[in-house]
Image (tube, helix red, strand yellow):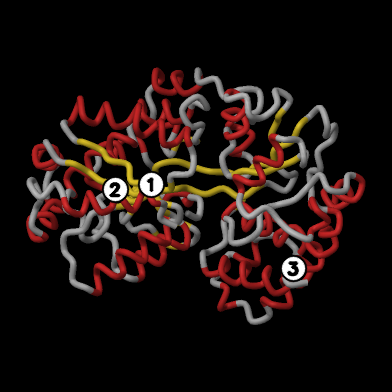
Amino acid sequence: MKKISLMASGLLVLMLAACSNETGKSSPEEADSLLKSDWKSVTEEATGQEVNMYMWGGNENINRYLDEWVAPRLQEEHDVELNRVPVNDAQDFVNQLVDEKSAGKTEGSMDIIWINGENFKAAKDNGLLWGDFTGLLPNFQDYIDPEAPEIAADFGEPVEGLEAPWGKAQFVLVYDEDKVKNPPKSMEELAAWAKENPGKFTYPALPDFTGSAFIRHVLYETTGGHGQYQQPAAEIADLDKRMEPMWQYLNEIEPYLWREGETYPESLAKQEQLFASGEVWMTMSYDPALAASEVLKGRFPESTRTYVLDGGTLANTHYLSIPFNSSQKAGAMVAINEMMSPEAQTAKLSPENWGDLSALDFEKLSAEQQQAMNDVDLGAATLPIEELEQNRLPELSSDYIEIIEKGWMENVAKD
């Protein structure tokens, strides 16, 4: 999930949600009993509930998918109303939940949160999530392999049923094939390409989530691979020394970046604008179908394509969770279950809606459901799912992220 601070519209919805919908709320004791209930009882209690979903609101396609595809079906099929509450940074609602827990607030305004990575770990460590609810969801039982590594752990942190998988992301590099005939497939090739094409490559400034991911690829390639980092950062005594080649590489390419590396795009959105205008010839994304979506909208040129590095690219799962003080836990479970259905996941896969990879285990789908997913036109700019699956790299545990972001400021940005 992208790093995202509450926008004015999000604040307004937050205040309205906190002051409304007092009817239909369950007491904490009644809500906790849901974890021992059956699905029929959950759906009965959910009827008529109004559920607030707090999520990053910076992508029009994602917002439209929630508002125009998910919400109407929830209302029609389950009599559950879904309100999407946009935020700029998931850390903001984690901080709000910390404050609410400290204040003893047992009935909050958040019912579903879109979360993963360091924000999940922070929420889990601070007891901000409701409980082990995923096993109650029929679509989790039917279509998810809970033991799969990419499902069972979130950036190295055991999930333990506290969040339900909603989709998968994988890092891709985006380029204009009319301008870039042979896109660089390794960091060594990228350095050479940047020097041959000064000003045509850059990456978002940290702490941008995608910019941070780009640097993690540099770390893997310049320091001997990802295997050595599949343990907590605190257990690596010489971590600073191991990271030195990464900083050297980033400083080496800096003079050949956009604006000679004197400044960096402050966000992925800004970087995408540079690519759309032709100022840079490459960009990047955690969304393999983003390029196809942007081509459909006429923002990116028809010649836009994506690729992965020869050594693979980072892949992760993003999740939906229920805060400890959600006032509408039954409705939240019904909504999350619906968003995990094969129909919702197939619609989400289409670049016309979102282009997000399915969280479901393909082998658990029926032949008809598999065919429906296979029939989705991902567009010429999107790599085949099989190619993506064959080139997945594991994420670092979340404790590395802050170290890398701080190190970038000290070793690259300040220089």
Q: Is residue 212 left or right of residue 195?
A: left
At a point 35% along the width and 27% down the height, the residue shown is 68
Residue 90 picture quarter = bottom left
Q: Is residue 86 left or right of residue 243?
A: left
Residue tagged by mark 1?
Answer: 86
SS at circle 3: helix
SS at circle 1: strand
Mark 3 or 2, closer to the camera? 2
Q: Quadrant of the C terminus?
A: bottom right
x, y percentage for residue 413? 72, 67
x, y percentage for residue 273? 66, 40
Amino acid type at mark 2: Val
What number is the disc on residue 13?
2
Mark 3 or 1, closer to the camera? 1
- Closest to the observer: 170 or 269? 269
Amino acid type at mark 1: Pro
x, y percentage for residue 70? 32, 31
